[in-house]
Image: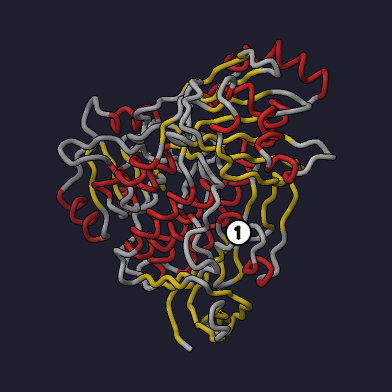
């Protein structure tokens, strides 16, 4: 038997991110994973600049840039490959300093996440371990584990457990949580192909808008390509494991490239679902990632949502374990993340249905409507920009009900005069961003509470952001979310929590 403050079950991107963030705060944690090493099959392939920002926070700014490929946005095409609409994104630097969309290979991402985790001596990773049962006891959680190599059984006591163990989560079952169905289930064929041939297409995501054979194409890396095809009821993935059967499906993109020049990396069938767990916490146990939510891939937020979960929870848990934040702040995790995840899943379902549903009528309607989608404000905002909705009100998101506010939104990762970008200056602490010079007493109080003062210089991005949000100052949380904003700097300073994780 051993004891540890935090046990994380599952070393996918979500678990690795949570472990790294806790490691940065010096929290001792044990990461348990049933696989002995990185799971070799490619799954997630896309993320936006908000999540790119999380990777940079982990210390992977350059490492991720080296394995990723910016993409230019989304192109809608019909079954004849005629372009219906195109929504471009900034492939260089969005509001957070990173490409608004990036493509990557998940095993490569997990490899750099694991390698980076070795920097933190407070984190231990055990591969080849199977968590079998979970029991909550007075003030702790008992985690029963089996070594998959030797068969040895043992248990660990943890103050908190994070269930990052995927769609078939044992942790979710252990706390009695169930998935709520958001009425979306589709079978899709997912194909990864490697080739030295340059297919020569526009460097963005191509969505075939067709009710019979909807499809998605994207270039993932220098020699890697991904296709996804909606399957008919009588089809199986097995049929397409032979390149002679697969080739006709991908020929609209590969054209004259011979079949023998195309190497199949993976062919798999996935059932895309829209689901959210009915509860994400039971006392000292939390659900993150696919254990808490499943989303169709139409807006590329599946893996990203898990990293957002980890970013939201890790600093709160570190503060509670460090006795500088009250245990009640952990109540805000589900309040904030569940509503956000649900809204993103519903958006993915809406866009997926709009792009691929409706039968013959849908096909005709899209030919008329799709070229005009950019004129619809809400849809244009989502398609052209990467910003996601504000977090809902909580004890750590102080949003007034009847007026516009920055609270709940992300502070831009703007360049700060002579000090790099905002995230470099904040460095995992609370920050007070202000265009009004604080008094000496206010400066001392901000420092006493463990926060950092960030001046919004006239004409700079942060200054413009405050003006557009109707504020002269904002309290920004360690995850980059605005806690509170307004014009009364003394009042904002008084609301600043003490945080010294």
Numbered label tally: 1
**SS at mark 1 in the image:** loop
Q: Is residue 466 visible?
A: yes
Instruction: Provide residue 46's location: percent of width, then percent of height.
Output: 50, 39
Mark 1 nearby-residue class (10 Å; few <14, some 14–19, many ≥20): many
Rendered position, 158 above or below 48: below
Q: Residue at x 32, y 54 (%)?
A: 428
Rendered position, 419 above or below 29: above
Quadrant of res 212:
top right
Near-viewer residue (471 or 414): 414
Q: Is residue 298 left or right of residue 101?
A: right
Rendered position, 232 above or below 74: below
Instruction: Provide residue 164's location: percent of width, then percent of height.
Output: 55, 62
Q: Is residue 501 visible?
A: no
Q: Is residue 321 left or right of residue 263?
A: left
Rendered position, 40 above or below 68: below
Near-viewer residue (240 or 38): 240
Near-viewer residue (369 or 223): 223
Instruction: Provide residue 103's location: percent of width, then percent of height.
Output: 46, 37
Q: Residue at x 31, y 52 (%)?
A: 59
Q: Residue at x 55, y 51 (%)?
A: 41
The single residue placed furthest to the bottom in the displayed view is 1
Which residue has dot 1 on it?
A: 166
Please, which colouring scheme is shown? secondary structure
The single residue placed furthest to the right in the displayed view is 234
Quadrant of res 147:
bottom right
Q: Is residue 157 left or right of residue 318?
A: right
- Quadrant where the C terminus is found in the figure: bottom left
Instruction: Provide residue 62's location: percent of width, then percent of height.
Output: 29, 44
Near-viewer residue (492 or 68): 68
């Amino acid at each position: 038997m051993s004891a540890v403050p935090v046990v994380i079950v599952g070393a996918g991107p979500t678990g690795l991110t949570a472990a790294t963030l806790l490691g940065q705060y010096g929290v001792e944690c044990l990461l348990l994973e049933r696989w002995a090493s990185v799971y070799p099959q490619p799954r997630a392939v896309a993320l936006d600049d908000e999540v790119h920002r999380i990777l940079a926070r982990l210390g992977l700014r350059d490492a991720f840039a080296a394995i990723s490929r910016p993409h230019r946005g989304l192109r809608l095409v019909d079954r004849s490959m005629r372009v219906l609409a195109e929504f471009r994104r900034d492939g260089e630097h969005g509001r957070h300093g990173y490409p608004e969309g990036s493509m990557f290979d998940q095993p490569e991402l997990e490899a750099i996440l694991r390698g980076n985790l070795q920097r933190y001596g407070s984190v231990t990773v055990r591969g080849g371990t199977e968590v079998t049962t979970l029991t909550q006891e007075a003030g702790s959680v008992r985690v029963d584990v089996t070594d998959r190599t030797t068969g040895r059984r043992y248990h660990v006591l943890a103050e908190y457990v994070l269930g990052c163990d995927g769609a078939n989560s044992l942790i979710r079952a252990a706390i009695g949580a169930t998935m709520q169905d958001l009425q979306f289930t589709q079978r899709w064929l997912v194909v990864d192909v490697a080739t030295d041939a340059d297919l020569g297409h526009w460097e963005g995501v191509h969505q075939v808008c067709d009710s019979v054979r909807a499809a998605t194409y994207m270039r993932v890396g220098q020699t890697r390509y991904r296709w996804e095809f909606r399957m008919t009821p009588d089809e199986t993935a097995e049929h397409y494991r032979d390149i002679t059967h697969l080739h006709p499906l991908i020929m609209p993109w590969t054209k004259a490239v011979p079949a023998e020049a195309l190497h199949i990396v993976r062919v798999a069938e996935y059932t895309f679902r829209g689901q959210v767990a009915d509860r994400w916490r039971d006392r000292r146990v939390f659900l993150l990632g696919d254990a808490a939510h499943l989303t169709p891939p139409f807006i590329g937020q599946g893996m990203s949502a898990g990293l957002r979960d980890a970013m939201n929870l890790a600093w709160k848990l570190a503060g509670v374990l460090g006795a500088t934040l009250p245990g009640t702040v952990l109540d805000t995790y589900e309040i904030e993340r569940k509503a956000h995840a649900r809204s993103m899943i519903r958006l993915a379902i809406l866009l997926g249905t709009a792009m691929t549903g409706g039968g013959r009528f849908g096909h005709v309607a899209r030919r008329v409507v799709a070229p005009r989608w950019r004129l619809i404000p809400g849809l244009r905002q989502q398609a052209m920009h990467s910003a996601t909705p504000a977090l809902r009100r909580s004890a750590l998101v102080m949003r007034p009900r009847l007026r516009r506010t920055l609270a709940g939104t992300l502070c831009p990762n703007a360049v700060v005069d002579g000090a790099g970008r905002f995230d470099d200056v904040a460095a995992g602490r609370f920050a007070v961003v202000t265009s009004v010079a604080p008094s000496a007493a206010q400066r001392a109080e901000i420092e006493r509470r463990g926060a950092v003062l960030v001046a919004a210089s006239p004409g700079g991005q942060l200054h413009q952001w405050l003006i557009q949000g109707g504020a002269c100052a904002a309290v920004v949380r360690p995850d980059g979310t605005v806690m509170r904003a307004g014009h009364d700097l003394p009042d904002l300073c008084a609301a600043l929590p003490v945080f010294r994780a």
